[in-house]
Amino acid sequence: MTPSITTQDWHTAGEPFRIVTSVETEGESVAERRMHAAAGEPDRVRRFLCLEPRGHDDMYGGFITPPDDAGADFGVVFWHKDGFSTACGHGTMALGAWAVTTGRVTAPDDGEAVVTIDVPSGRVQARVQRTRGRTTGVIFRSVESRVLQREITLETTRGIVTVDLVYGGAIYATLAADSVGLTVQPEHVTDLIAIGREIKWALNDHPAAQLEDPRLGGVYGTVLFDDLGRNETGPWQRNVTIFADGQVDRSPCGSGTAARTALLASTGALTDGERLTHDSIIGTRFHSRIAETTPDGVIPEIAGTAHPIGTCSFALADDDPLPRGFSLR
């Protein structure tokens, strides 16, 4: 029996986040640690914790690391069923709430605690809202988000579609669900996964998806959205993000919401003082606003909630035939 690995499991708007503090990663920065992790022992641990029978095809998590410098509280290498990602907004929200709950970052009983986290795409913040000793919400302050290319015409198995490529810490292809004959509803999830995968891989090598830092390049996911019009605060949409290779985000997707915020800001559909109401495929919700305008894009702030699920202890028996786990997707 191998030594056990203890995780602290959370969810943000329904999307899981498995926190691991005991796995060592190598590198001078979190971005370097991500690259080394993909080729070393941390990748074995990722598979062990993420895939069946200990996880599932839609599990998500992260290894806590030292920060890049004293300006952050800690770092994190994010992982999913297919590897390691460059950004994760829902995970950042969960980490903010976890850091306050565990005392890693001191927080007032009433007010706000700012948790600063180094992630592979840069430095982000989780602003943890507190009332009477309870965490009542978390605001994710993203890296700069920007439009990479508008209106890319793409031939798919569901016809010719127009897709935008946008960066929100990771690169997303985004399009209206009705342009492929679908709506963002649970009964369409199999078809949404199929077209999301198809578009991601069709555009993964597109020139607009190749950034100056090659570690951030390639299309991470596809955001399909329903336009629900406007409410009293601004635009209202429902989305599902199909990321990695067919993984389904249950939340409205934090970094995907950052990308959508940048796109809506660029078209004038979201202006200063307004909020994007962003619903998920299961009916949970984020709110996003333009916190700052930059020369190339915007800094989005995305509000949501995160909740603890439980603490798990995983061990591998010497005769277990599935040490690397498996995926049926």
Image (cartoon, helix red, strand yellow):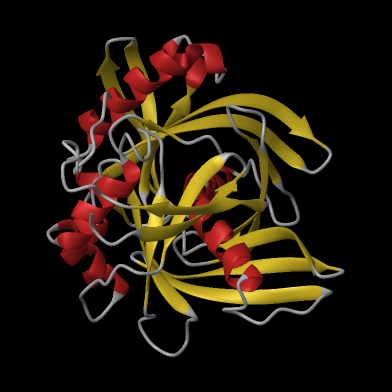
Q: Residue at x 84, y 39 (%)?
A: 232
Q: Provide residue 34's location: percent of width, then percent of height.
A: 25, 64
Snapshot quadrant of residue 199: top left
Quadrant for the N terminus in the image: bottom left
Relative to the observer, which residue lies in front, 57 or 280?
A: 57
Q: Is residue 308 visible?
A: yes
- Taking 202 as reference, is 212 above or below it? below
Vertical relation: 79 (above or below) 132: above
Q: Residue furthest right?
A: 132
Which residue: 45% across, 28% down?
Answer: 175
Residue 301 image point, x, y percent:
62, 59
Q: Residue at x 46, y 15 (%)?
A: 179
Examine the image and state in which quarter residue 96 appears: bottom right
Q: Is 125 displayed left or right of 28 in the figure?
A: right
> Quick check: 58 above or below 177?
below
Direction from residue 52 to residue 143 in the image, left or right: right
**Most distant residue in the bottom direction:** 70
> In the figure, is residue 197 to the left or right of 70?
left
- Total marks shown come to 0
Q: Is residue 158 above or below residue 206?
A: above
The residue located at (80%, 34%) in the rendering is 231
Q: Quadrant of residue 279?
A: top right
**Relative to 108, is 191 on the left or the right?**
left
Q: Nearer the viewer, residue 48 or 78?
A: 48
Q: Is residue 292 visible?
A: no
Q: Quadrant of the C terminus?
A: top left
Instruction: Give the x, y percent position of residue 95.
Output: 54, 63
